[in-house]
Image (cartoon, grey):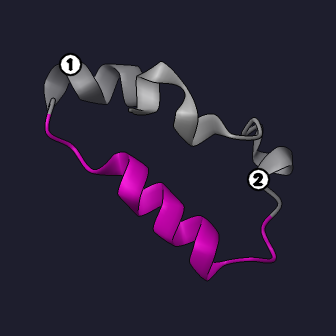
Amino acid sequence: MKYLLNIIQPQNNLKIQLLDLLEKYTSVDPKALGIKPHWQNESLWK
C-alpha cells in the first residue's frame, strides 16, 4: 500500500498517520497486523 501511495502521492503522510494510530490504540498488537519490528526504519518508510 505504501509503495503504491508513494507513486500516486509522493508527499503522503501515511507513516505519521500509522504511527499516530499505533500510539493511540496501544492494545493493538502490530505483530498481529503483520508489521515487523522497527518497520519505520526500513527504506520504504523513510
Residue 13, given in percent of the width and then of the height, sits at 27, 50
Mark 1: which amino acid? Answer: Ile
Q: Is residue 1 above or below residue 26?
A: above
Q: In the image, residue 24 lies at what x, y percent?
A: 59, 81
Residue under label 1: 7
Q: Quadrant of the C terminus?
A: top left
Q: Is residue 11 visible?
A: yes
Percent from the top left, x then y, of residue 8?
16, 25
Considering the numbered disc 2 on the image, is that residue within a helix, a strand or a loop?
A: helix
Q: Magenta residues, as a range?
A: 11-28
Marking on residue 34: none
Q: From the viewer's perspective, is 36 left or right of 46?
A: right
Which quadrant of the figure has residue 38?
A: top right
- Closer to the camera in the image, 31 or 1: 31
For the point 28% across and 29% down, which residue is it? Answer: 5
Residue at the spot x=43%, y=33% of the render?
45
Say which quadrant the N terminus sits in.
Answer: top left
The reply to whether the magenta stretch includes residue 44 is: no
Residue linked to disc 2: 30
Residue 1 can be seen, yes or no: no
